Image: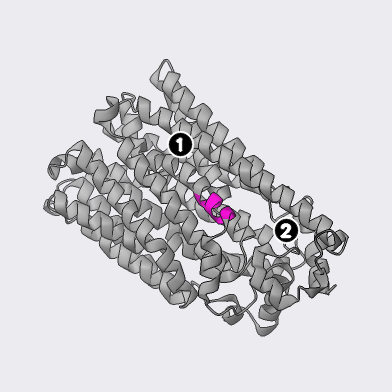
């Protein structure tokens, strides 16, 4: 058996307590961190801000000024996710055949311009069109970044980095509430409404940052110019010992087909489907939910800050624990039940204050669960093209849940209390917990089965484990008997 096979079989990093801050290559990993994480987190913060600031604009008069009724407002929200769903898989296929250093900043520049245009729309038709275009232009960022992480970090290192990155979404909610409150004071400046200035100013900020991103976002790991030749060689060596991330893999449709026929890939997608319903309904309707508790619009803007801040802290602490103990499923399931408790308090709380506490639990559980599950396919799917498609599929199918969420959270349907939508949200969280349990049980069983096969040399199944050379392992990807899932 080759050294690489032994390494995959006996790696203590995937079977015991793992400290994400304690690696033999700490200096190298930190250098990669400082190059990737700040700029990519900032891009995602802006992405989340530009897609969810419509909730802040709504309570400042967007629907009134554009004569958009409640059902049509929900349709506008849904159109964003329809475009997101349609363009995510193609976007990641383009990324695999292109260069992230150009592709990701270009996406950011284009959606920044589209975001500015949101502040220039004059009617309902314009709102529909611009929201669809925003979804199309933002679709490639998140799955592209998750895939980029997978070619720079070893498997057990990725979840913590994805958590920091996804924490930008929660920070966007906190930052967005403060920014919307401040920008709302510009009502009447230049003959424009306060809600228009929210889109224009935040879109300009995004476009400006995108120009900086062209000089910071890195290319593929085997071409990374911010590393010295020795550092790049060491990076590729540690990746090769851990997974397929160091390979210069050519695009093949075989791996695309492999992704579409893998039940685990579909399970990751369904897991996010359950969590995406609550993620986007909560983030888009949080100002409205808080206003519905009896607070005025300016109070509602500011009161979105504490739950979103708590969500960020919850993400970072929980994912640190998850990385330390190298476990995903128990923390995802736990996050789902924390969110369920929050929704129950929101439904049954006797006072607005009690219900506001429920909002905090819901936000913490929803954002934390999403941060954990979105890194899971990147850790468990191989080869590279299959992983790129799997990540995009997860977001695509997940965001169908987002479409359902924004269509179900209709004030006319729930008499402004969102009682029925909140009950449906609990159902989606229970579904997500069930899918996470399925993944946990199946992958645990499969890891044990492969351990037994390798231990007896494949004799029980008439397999010769020595026949699986490096090329064959790559072809099989995560189906290789030498591959172990992170659970």
> Given the current orientation, which residue lies at the most extreme bottom position?
229
Magenta segment's dominant SS is helix
Q: Which mark is residue 482?
A: none
Q: Which residue does the numbered mark 1 point to in the structure image? A: 306
Q: Residue 29: percent from the left, percent from the top?
A: 67, 67
Protein image colouring: one colour
In this rendering, position of residue 268 left or right of residue 212: right
Residue at disc 1, secondary structure: helix
Residue at (69, 80) in percent of width and height? 233
User: Residue shown at 63%/69% (left/top)?
Assistant: 31
- Left or right: residue 329 compared with residue 409: right
Tell me residue 146's x, y (percent): 53, 61
Kindly identify the residue that appears in the image at 39 percent across and 48 percent down.
Answer: 400
> Which one is nearer the viewer's eye here, 77 or 360?
77
Q: Secondary structure at mark 2?
A: loop
Residue 215 is at least partly visible in this image: no
Query: Residue 307, position in %: x, y?
Result: 46, 36
Left or right of 216 on screen, residue 180 = left
Q: Is residue 401 above or below residue 385?
A: above
Q: Is residue 255 found inside the magenta-colored segment of the image? A: no
Number of other residues with Cα within 10 Å of mark 2, as a class: few under 14, some 14 to 19, many 20 or more: many
| Residue 349 sits above or below residue 110 on the image | above
Residue at the front extreme of this rendering: 462
- The residues tagged by marks 2 and 1 sit, at their Cα atoms, a distance apart of 40 Å
First in sequence, mark 2 or 1: give its number. 1
Residue identified by numbered label 2: 484
Is residue 379 depicted above or below 105 in this figure? Answer: above
What stretch of residues is rendered in magenta? 263-269
């Amino acid at each position: 058996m080759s050294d690489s096979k032994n390494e995959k079989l006996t790696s203590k990093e995937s079977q015991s307590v793992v400290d994400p801050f304690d690696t033999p290559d700490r200096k190298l990993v930190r250098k990669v961190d400082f190059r990737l994480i700040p700029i990519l987190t900032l891009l995602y913060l802006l992405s989340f801000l530009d897609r969810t600031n419509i909730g802040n604009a709504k309570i400042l008069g967007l629907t009134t000024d554009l004569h958009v009724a409640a059902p049509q407002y929900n349709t506008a929200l849904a159109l964003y996710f329809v475009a997101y769903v349609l363009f995510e898989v193609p976007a990641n296929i383009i990324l695999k055949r292109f260069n992230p250093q150009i592709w990701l900043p270009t996406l950011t520049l284009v959606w920044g311009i589209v975001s500015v245009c949101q502040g220039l729309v004059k009617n309902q038709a314009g709102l529909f069109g611009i929201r669809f275009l925003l979804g199309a232009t933002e679709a490639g960022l998140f799955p592209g970044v998750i895939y980029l992480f997978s070619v720079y970090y070893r498997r057990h290192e990725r979840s913590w980095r994805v958590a920091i990155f996804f924490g930008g979404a929660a920070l966007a909610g906190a930052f967005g509430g403060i920014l919307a409150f401040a920008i709302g004071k510009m009502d009447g400046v230049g003959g424009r409404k306060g809600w228009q200035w929210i889109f224009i100013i935040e879109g300009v900020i995004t476009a400006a940052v995108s120009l900086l991103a062209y000089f910071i976002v890195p290319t593929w790991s085997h071409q990374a110019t911010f590393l010295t030749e020795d550092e790049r060689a060491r990076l590729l060596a540690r990746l090769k010992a851990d997974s397929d991330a160091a390979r210069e893999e050519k695009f093949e449709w075989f791996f695309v087909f492999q992704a579409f026929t893998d039940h685990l890939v579909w399970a990751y997608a369904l897991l996010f489907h359950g969590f995406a319903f609550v993620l986007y309904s909560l983030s888009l309707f949080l100002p409205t939910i808080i206003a519905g508790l009896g607070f005025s619009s300016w109070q509602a803007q500011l009161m979105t800050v504490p739950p979103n801040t708590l969500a960020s802290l919850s993400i970072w602490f929980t994912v640190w624990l998850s990385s330390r103990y190298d476990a995903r499923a128990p923390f995802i399931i736990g996050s789902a039940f924390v969110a369920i408790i929050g929704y129950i308090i929101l439904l049954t709380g006797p006072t607005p204050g009690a219900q506001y506490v429920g909002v905090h639990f819901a936000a913490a559980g929803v954002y934390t669960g999403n941060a954990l599950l979105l890194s899971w396919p990147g850790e468990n799917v191989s080869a590279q093209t299959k992983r790129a498609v799997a990540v995009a599929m997860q977001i695509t199918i997940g965001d169908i849940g987002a479409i359902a969420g924004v269509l179900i959270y209709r004030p006319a349907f729930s008499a402004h209390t969102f009682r029925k939508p909140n009950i449906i949200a609990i159902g989606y969280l229970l579904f997500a917990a069930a899918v996470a349990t399925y993944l946990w049980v199946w992958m645990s069983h499969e890891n044990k089965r492969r351990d037994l096969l390798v231990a007896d040399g494949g004799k029980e199944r008439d397999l010769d484990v020595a026949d699986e050379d490096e090329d064959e392992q790559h072809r099989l990807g995560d189906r290789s008997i030498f591959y172990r899932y992170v659970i």
